[in-house]
Amino acid sequence: MNDSLPQLQYLLSEARRLANDAGDKIMEIYNQDFNVAAKDDRSPLTAADLAAHRIIRDGLKALSPQFPVLSEESNQLPYDTRGSWETYWLIDPLDGTREFIKRNGEFTVNIALIHGHDAVLGVVAAPAKNLCYYACRGQGAYKIADGGQARRIRVRKPTPKRPTVAGSRSHAGDSLVAFLAKLGEHELISMGSAFKLCLVAEGVVDIYPRFGPTSEWDTAAAQCVVEEAGGIVSDLQMKRLRYNTKDSLLNPHFVVIGNPDYDWAAYF
């Protein structure tokens, strides 16, 4: 890919448009009665997942036919096929399907552009909350609320004595409980989807530890936002998360950290 800034900014604006279009369709279904099916891994699937997938997939293929599209809702390709991809789109059309089903509004549309195993562009839209977080390499991270003006966001530094921790609303477990006990005094915010990473990016949350299973499309878009806001997304050995490096599309356990200068590793 020609990693030039003008192209990235154009692709970012188009990805934001597609995320908005997908979000409109998701909300149309959200406000109706809908059926819930089960995928092979027993995770839930709705008409909103599939409709958003089609909107984004078709839009990205028209926008940049030279870049493959890998989506949670597409047929998963073996590493022998996708391992040679230098640049591709990685999307989760509806991240937080469980939250969508619960109708708590904590779901997002995630669109990332991966280049050289790194997320160089990311859009995380939350249609039920009228929020959009976005970033591209070298240009900072931004948030738009209620259709207003874009506001640059940054992680919180220094880390307060009573840090704020984000936890998964639907996937909390014993490892998180143990981490919090070791951490000591803190505030816990339970939240669904990629929202948690974006809360770190905008300085509301100091750390989001994830000790359960996630897939690469769950984190890529928000990782770009976090990194452009000054934070990091790393595994528990403090190595940065990278994409399309192995056969499995599952992430390792990871942490999202606002202030990289703080010794978080002492707690996990």
Image: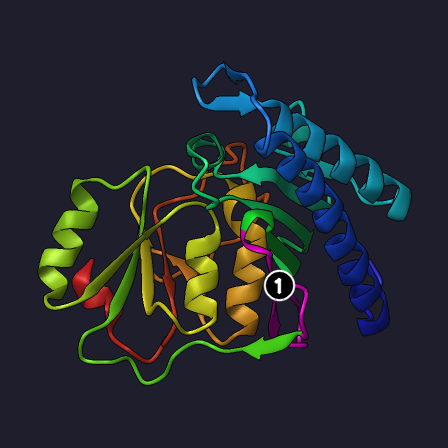
Residue 37: x %, y % from top left: 52, 15
Taking the view exactly as shown, the residue that stands out farthest to the front is 32
Specify whether 15 is left or right of 189: right
Q: Is residue 3 visible?
A: no
Residue 112 position within the rendered picture, expressed as x and y whole percent measured from the top left: 65, 52
Q: Position of residue 59 (x, y in %)?
A: 83, 41
Residue type at the position of mark 1: Asp
Relative horizontal placement of residue 64, taking residue 129 as reference (left or right): right
Position of the C terminus by quadrant: bottom left
Work out whether 202 lies above or below 63.
Answer: below
Residue 171 vertical placement versus 15 (above, below)? above
**Quarter occupied by residue 43:** top left
The residue wearing badge 1 is: 146
Image quarter of residue 188: bottom left
The residue under the point 67% across, 35% down is 28
Colour scheme of the rendered structure: rainbow
Residue 21 visible: yes
Q: Quadrant of the N terminus?
A: bottom right
Of the pair 32 and 160, the residue shown nearer to us: 32
Instruction: Using the image as rendered, state which of residue 219 and residue 163 is in the foreground.
Output: 163
Would you place residue 159 above or below residue 163 in this image? Answer: below
Which residue is at a point 51% across and 44% down the rendered structure image? 107
User: Circle 1 sits in a helix, a strand or a loop, which is it?
Assistant: loop
Left or right of 99: which side holds 188?
A: left
Between 36 and 184, the one nearer to me in the picture: 36
Q: What number of labels is visible?
A: 1
Whole-percent x, y for residue 113 in the image: 70, 53
Q: Which residues are magenta?
A: 129-149
